[in-house]
């Protein structure tokens, strides 16, 4: 399965997991990280265009950002939150690519496909991930999100805004 095949979300999303027997498990371990508290700045990762992001890419992005930021601020110097959830089931109609496979395949006849992955549809300008930090760690948070951008199928932008106090 190639990730570029699922980059654009075409058609109606399929989210009815109760009808599928072998549904894939979500790979995202945690949606929040760091320590909740009062922070001065919110650094956000915003999508530039409409795209569909697979759950493996979301988890890789989260790990890259948290690991980079944890090195500079420590475990209690930031708070991170994922703002998207992969609801959509992505299906693949696997074709046999071997000698003599022409008698086993049915081609596009009844091509529903098996559920292979999960994806989140993201609108243009939607927040993917946000980091809450104090004034001394804003540049480290921007660097962490810049490293996490590489894991995503689109080129997001980074927005820094003053937050005041966070008490989620």
Image (spheres, rainbow, N blue to C red):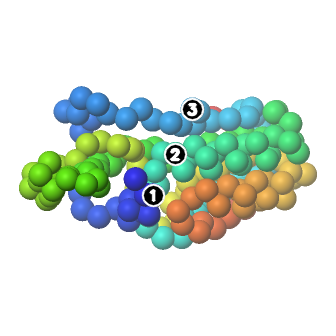
Residue displayed at 45% across by 58% down: 3
SS class, disc 1: helix
Residue 24: quarter of image: top left
Give the spatial CA distance, label 1 vs label 3: 20 Å
Quarter that holds the C terminus = top right
Residue farthest along the left direction in this orientation: 109
Q: Is residue 157 visible?
A: yes
Q: Point out residue 122 in the picture as x, y percentages from the top left corner.
A: 44, 58
Vertical placement of residue 35 versus 99, above or below: above
Q: Which residue appears farthest toward the front when viewing the image?
A: 99
For discs 1 and 3, the disc positioned in front in the rendered view: 1
Q: SS at mark 2?
A: helix
130 or 55: which is nearer to us? 55
Point out the frontmost of discs 2 and 3: 2
Residue 47 picture quarter: bottom right
Compared with 98, 17 (above or below) is above
Disc 2 designates what residue?
56
Locate residue 81: give its quadrant. top right
Classify residue 52 as left or right of residue 12: right
- The residue singled out by tag 1 in the image is 3
Which label number is shown at residue 29?
3
Residue 86, x across and y down, in percent: 42, 45
Q: Position of residue 161 (x, y in %)?
A: 71, 60
């Amino acid at each position: 399965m190639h990730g570029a095949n699922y980059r654009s979300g075409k058609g109606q999303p399929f989210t009815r997991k109760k009808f599928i027997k072998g549904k894939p498990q979500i790979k995202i371990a945690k949606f929040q990280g760091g320590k909740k508290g009062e922070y001065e700045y919110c650094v956000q990762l915003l999508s530039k265009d409409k795209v569909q992001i697979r759950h493996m890419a979301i988890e890789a992005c989260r790990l890259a950002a948290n690991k980079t930021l944890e090195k500079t601020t420590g475990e209690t110097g930031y708070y991170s939150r994922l703002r998207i959830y992969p609801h959509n089931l992505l299906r693949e109609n696997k074709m046999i690519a071997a000698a003599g496979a022409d008698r086993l395949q049915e081609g596009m006849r009844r091509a529903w496909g098996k559920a292979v992955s999960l994806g989140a549809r993201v609108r243009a300008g939607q927040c993917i991930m946000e980091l809450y930090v104090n004034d001394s760690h804003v540049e480290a948070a921007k660097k962490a999100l810049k490293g996490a951008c590489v894991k995503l199928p689109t080129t997001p932008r980074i927005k820094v805004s003053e937050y005041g106090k966070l008490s989620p």
